[in-house]
């Protein structure tokens, strides 16, 4: 809280340089007031911004050119910074009213200065509050995201995946495809290329799982990283042929991935839940068994080992 107060105090001290007279008070009523000074007392006035640009001229100033540096006139200040100047010429003011007019003008300048400062503070407070609210929204969203998502990949973490799975069970959503995905030889990458590359492999696979779901129109796909190199995917209201096409797509995307070191490969098992009485736990257990069969076939396929080890040449 103290940091926020300090930041706001610094903001208030610095930001007045970004304001112009029109941001702080209505120029039309100001012109009306100065016109009344002229008509009632003969006082001529000229208002400029901080840089000397003329905003209004009431009365006769001839070829007068404001010099706000050397002859600044009456300054209107906000937090110690000049925001505008009012030049006054008393040539047409009666001698007996001269002192009264000076006091009136001083009072008006003081009033205008206080109004400008109040406008400035109100504006800055409104902007600052809006920024704090936006920051709070971002922090709340980030906290919620952190509580639900795996920090490495951005897909759901194990706990939130289970929560989503229970929700689908309670809503009796069928058919639902339950898919188990395991990265083949993740440990080989970790042992030979290090943690950074093995993490990159996990992220690569997660991105493929998300991208292919989006491309296939499976916007309700529930994707979670449930262990280090294991992902579970639920595809609610998806028919078996759609689920199989998704499984084929993610495996093909991994196999065609080009990289100097990584050769991503995944084993996939897919089982359909078509009966609301079936438990997801059993369904996923069956999917894991199917995944292990697929893993055995992949790892014993010709060329698998050569592709896996190609990165050793570039290590």
Image (tube, helix red, strand yellow):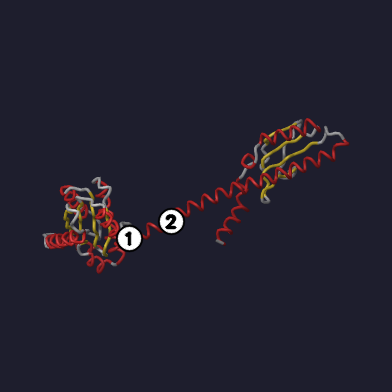
Q: Earlier in the sequence, mark 2 or mark 1?
A: 2
Residue 17 to residue 145: above or below = above
Q: Which residue carries the number 1 mark? A: 150
Location of residue 56 by image quarter = top right
Location of residue 158 by image quarter = bottom left
Q: Is residue 265 visible?
A: no
Q: Quadrant of the N terminus?
A: bottom right
Disc 1 secondary structure class = loop
Q: Residue 223 in the image: x percent, y percent?
A: 27, 55
Is 129 in front, or is 103? 129
In this view, the residue farthest toward the bottom is 191
Residue 283 to residue 23: above or below = below
Residue at 57% from the left image edge and 57% from the top image edge: 7
Is 28 in front, or is 308? 28
What mark, if any, has residue 252 been given in the picture? none
Disc 2 secondary structure class = helix
Characterize the local packing of mark 1: few (<14), some (14-19) or many (20 or more) Cα atoms within 10 angstroms: some
Distance between mark 2 and mark 1 Cα atoms: 17 Å
What mark, if any, has residue 140 been given in the picture? 2
Is 204 in front, or is 222? 222
In this view, the residue farthest toward the right is 96
Q: Quadrant of the C terminus?
A: bottom left
Q: Residue 101 in the image: x percent, y percent?
A: 81, 38
Characterize the local packing of mark 2: few (<14), some (14-19) or many (20 or more) Cα atoms within 10 angstroms: few
């Amino acid at each position: 809280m103290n940091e926020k107060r300090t930041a706001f105090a610094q903001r208030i001290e610095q930001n007045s340089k970004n304001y112009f007279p029109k941001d702080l008070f209505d120029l039309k009523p100001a012109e009306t007031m100065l016109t009344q000074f002229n008509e009632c007392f003969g006082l001529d006035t000229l208002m400029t911004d901080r840089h000397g640009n003329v905003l209004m001229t009431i009365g006769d100033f001839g070829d007068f050119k404001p010099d706000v540096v050397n002859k600044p006139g009456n300054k209107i200040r906000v937090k110690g910074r000049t925001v505008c100047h009012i030049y006054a010429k008393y040539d047409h003011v009666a001698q007996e009213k001269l002192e009264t007019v000076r006091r009136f003008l001083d009072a008006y300048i003081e009033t205008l200065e206080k109004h400008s400062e109040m406008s400035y503070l109100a504006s800055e407070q409104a902007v600052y509050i809006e920024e704090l609210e936006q920051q709070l929204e971002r922090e709340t969203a980030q906290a919620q995201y952190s509580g639900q998502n795996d920090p490495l990949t951005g897909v759901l973490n194990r706990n939130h995946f289970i929560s989503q799975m229970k929700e689908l069970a309670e809503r009796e959503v069928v058919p639902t495809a339950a898919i188990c995905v395991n990265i083949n030889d993740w440990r080989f990458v970790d042992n030979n290329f290090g943690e950074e590359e093995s993490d990159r492999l996990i992220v690569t696979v997660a991105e493929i799982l998300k991208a292919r779901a989006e491309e296939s129109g499976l916007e309700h796909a529930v994707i979670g990283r449930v262990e280090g190199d294991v992902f579970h995917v639920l595809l609610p209201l998806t028919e078996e042929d759609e689920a199989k096409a998704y499984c084929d797509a993610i495996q093909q995307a991994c196999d065609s991935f080009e990289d100097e070191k990584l050769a991503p490969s995944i084993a996939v098992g897919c089982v359909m839940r078509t009966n609301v009485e079936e438990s997801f736990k059993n369904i996923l257990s069956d999917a894991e068994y199917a995944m292990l069969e697929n893993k055995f076939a992949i790892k014993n396929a010709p060329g698998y080992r050569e592709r896996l080890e190609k990165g050793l040449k570039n290590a």
